[in-house]
Image (cartoon, rainbow, N blue to C red):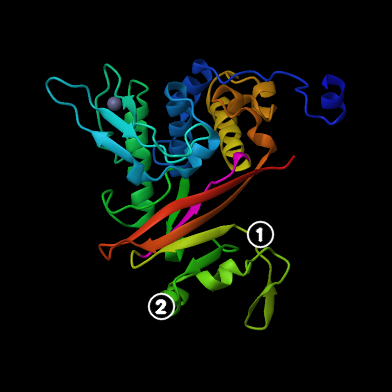
């Protein structure tokens, strides 16, 4: 069996370095606090130091699943995270998992006199998470309370969805979205999305008789009547890429190389540390579902992810 495993390349060839606290610390020390992607990636890393979860759990997490608890005289502030899917918990009976604000944390991040975010003095996963949500809601152009999106996602006001993106919208909002979206964004209906239509660079955009082929930027979903769209990271590859990027930046911005290149490049390093284990061999098929809740409000959720092991 062992030989077979090696022959079929299922064996572990090496044990990558584990994501360590000091590496996360390096990212924390150098992160740009106004950069949504960096702060969200940092949230992923810090949260995982406390709550190691499987990739599928993290990628399905909506902001609605995260409840913030304010500190009171007798209790420490923090957050409760409700994981909706787990390999060991398919019936969704998991209790919410707590995430505590750390001692010495000054709470919500504030802007200084120069208008820039003041870097927090202590590494607090709760307040890094809250800051990530705030930045996402600013990108979406809605209030923090109004933001409906997967936690690990990119959010943009419709006019800011990048060229090369495929933008999925409800039939009844299609015309309005067409007006606002960029000219090199493929706007399609949900029905068309189900049929498999998307911009992948194989067919050019035609604009004033000229052909344009921007690099494909993935499938974004318009949140009904809110004027913004979301793009879920949704795959192990997507998260690894963002982690590597953040670690490289930490090195470039720091005075010395704090994260060994070997660690950055090792494809599983970060994820092994955060219990991703063999997810690099998994394909994550994900689609987002937008649906109308019973109360008539539109709600959005990264509702289903199909994880199919490729072998
Ligand atoms: Zn805190």
Local crowd size for mark 1, using a 10 Å CA cut-off: few (<14), some (14–19), many (≥20): few
Residue occupied by mark 1: 215
Q: Residue furthest left?
A: 73
Label 2 Cα neighbours within 10 Å, binned few <14 / some 14-19 / many ≥20? few
Using the rendered view, name the quadrant where residue 260 is placed: top right
Query: What residue is rendered at 30% in x and 19% in y?
Result: 102
Question: Nearest the camera: 37 or 283?
Answer: 283
Against 152, residue 159 (above or below) is below
Callout 1: CB less than 8 Å from ligand 1: no
| Sequence-wise first label, 2 or 1 | 2
Q: Tell me residue 186's x, y (percent).
A: 57, 70
Report if the beta carbon of the residue with label 2 is closer than 8 angstroms to ligand 1.
no
Q: Which of the 4 image quadrants contains residue 32?
A: top left
Work out which quarter of the rendered image holds the C terminus and state it: top right
- The percent coordinates of residue 37 (x first, y second) are 48, 42
Looking at the image, in which quadrant does ligand 1 appear?
top left
Q: Which residues are magenta?
A: 227-236
Q: Is residue 11 magenta?
A: no
**Residue 96 appears in view:** yes
Locate residue 55: give its quadrant: top right
Answer with left or right where residue 120 lies relative to residue 54: left
The residue under label 2 is 172
Q: Position of residue 132 (x, y in %)?
A: 38, 40
Q: Residue at x 34, y 32 (%)?
A: 96
Q: Is residue 230 magenta?
A: yes
Q: Secondary structure at mark 2?
A: helix
């Amino acid at each position: 069996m062992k030989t077979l495993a090696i022959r079929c390349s299922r064996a572990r060839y090496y044990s990558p370095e584990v994501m360590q606290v000091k590496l996360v610390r390096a990212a924390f020390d150098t992160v740009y606090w106004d950069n949504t992607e960096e702060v969200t990636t940092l949230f992923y890393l810090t949260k995982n130091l406390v709550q190691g979860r499987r990739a599928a759990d993290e990628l399905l997490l909506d902001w609605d699943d995260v409840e913030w608890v304010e500190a009171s005289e007798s209790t420490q502030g923090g957050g409760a995270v409700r994981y909706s899917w787990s390999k060991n918990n398919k019936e969704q009976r998991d209790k919410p998992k707590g995430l505590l604000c750390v001692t010495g944390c000054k709470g919500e991040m504030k802007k200084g006199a120069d208008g820039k975010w003041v870097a927090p003095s202590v590494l607090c996963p709760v307040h890094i998470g809250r800051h990530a949500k705030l930045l996402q809601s600013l990108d979406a152009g809605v209030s923090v309370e109004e933001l409906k999106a997967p936690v690990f996602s990119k959010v943009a006001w419709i006019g800011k969805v990048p060229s090369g993106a495929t933008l999925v919208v409800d039939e009844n909002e299609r015309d309005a979205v067409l007006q606002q979206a960029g000219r090199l964004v493929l706007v399609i209906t949900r029905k068309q999305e189900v049929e498999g239509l998307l911009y992948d660079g194989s067919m050019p955009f035609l604009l004033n008789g000229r052909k344009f082929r921007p690099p494909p930027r993935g499938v974004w979903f318009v949140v009904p009547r809110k004027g913004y769209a979301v793009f879920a990271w949704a795959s192990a590859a997507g998260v690894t890429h963002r982690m590597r990027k953040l670690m490289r930046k930490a090195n470039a911005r720091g005075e010395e190389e704090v994260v060994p290149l070997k660690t950055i490049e090792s494809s599983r390093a970060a994820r092994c540390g955060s219990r991703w284990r063999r997810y690099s061999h998994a394909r994550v098929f994900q689609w987002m579902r937008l649906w109308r809740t019973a109360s008539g409000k539109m709600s959005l959720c990264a509702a289903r992810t199909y994880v199919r092991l490729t072998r």
